Amino acid sequence: MPEVLKAPLVVEFPFTRSLGPVQSAFLTGLRERVVLGVRTADGRTLVPPVEYDPVTAEEIRDLVEVAATGTVTTWAWNHAPRRGQPLTTPFAWVLVRLDGADTALLHALDAPGPDAVHTGMRVRIRWAAERTGAITDIACFEPHDGDRAQPAGHTGEFEDPVTGIVAAARLDYTYSPGRAQTAYINALSGRRTVGERCPSCRKVYVPPRGACPTCGVATSEQVEVGPRGTVTTFCIVNIKAKNLDIEVPYVYAHIALDGADLALHGRIGGIPYDEVRMGLRVEPVWTEGSRYPDHYRPTGEPDADYDTYKELL
């Protein structure tokens, strides 16, 4: 059996959000080396601040400054920091109840080892050298055996408040397509498209999944399909993607390759976008060195009859 493929994969996108008055004040405060919480109607001070009381669900806007010193309430040692974490050397994740707060803040504690960390130890904020209005403006916590810091009583009003943030959502993992799709990908490198036939219902699935989604039985019989096919349905893309060098508008379609019982995705080229239609007969266009078709173009054949692809919509 050919070796099953695997490769590192990264899924990443920037997440942009606006900030309400509470989060705006909190992040702007960090930029100015001020830690702000909110006071609830019953006198509790919540840090990090939230916009609604988690107990009563009442809106809370009463900002109050707390100290940059605090107490570790619980912790866990991180012996192997990962990309993007606060420190590059082993550190402790800690929940710290800052002086003046009734809840704890999660962050990193820079300590020489787990033996140097304990519940109840006193710590203080180590501020980042460059601050922009983000939680990373707190570089980490560090052990502190001095006096309790005294907040200055900041009101939460700032001349240049932070009104929005951009956070990168990212997932790193190793992906393996499995036996069936490994064969599919290897065939594409030879400019062939193969699916697998269900031994029960006899349908051919492309790309193959290793099992029939209808019957639930394993599939192993390979069947070469295409290369031509029929557009079953499509959409016109009018928003340009940052990572694709394709001018808009363009058409992305479901294409039922000849001999397949499942439509796959593909971009349609070689024809004005407003002339693409259901039933259009197309064929793949390969570029030099590519492992999959760059796009599909019209073959010049008459359009397929609707009854030949209606079950594949």
Image (tube, rainbow, N blue to C red):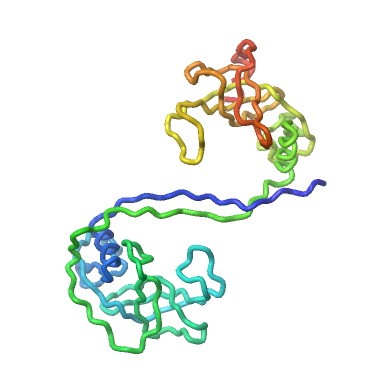
Relative vertical location of residue 276 with respect to residue 33 in this rendering, above or below = above
Q: Is residue 115 left or right of residue 152?
A: right
**Relative to the observer, which residue lies in front, 18 or 180?**
18
The quadrant of the picture occupied by the C terminus is top right
Q: How many marks?
A: 0
Q: In this view, does 247 lie to the left or right of 293?
A: left
Relative vertical location of residue 259 with respect to residue 241 in this rendering, above or below = above
Residue at the image point whose x is 28% and y is 85% from the top = 148
Locate residue 143: give its quadrant: bottom left
Residue at the image point whose x is 50% and y is 50% from the top = 12
The spot of residue 87 in percent (x, y) is 47, 71
**Relative to the observer, which residue lies in front, 313 or 152?**
152
Residue at the image point whose x is 74% and y is 45% from the top = 179
Q: Which residue lies furthest to the right in this view?
A: 1
**Relative to the observer, which residue lies in front, 64 or 269?**
269
The spot of residue 220 in percent (x, y) is 78, 39
The spot of residue 228 in percent (x, y) is 68, 22
Q: Is residue 56 left or right of residue 206?
A: left
Relative vertical location of residue 39 with respect to residue 172 in this rendering, above or below = below
The spot of residue 253 in percent (x, y) is 55, 27
Residue at the image point whose x is 43% and y is 29% from the top = 238
Locate residue 183: give its quadrant: top right
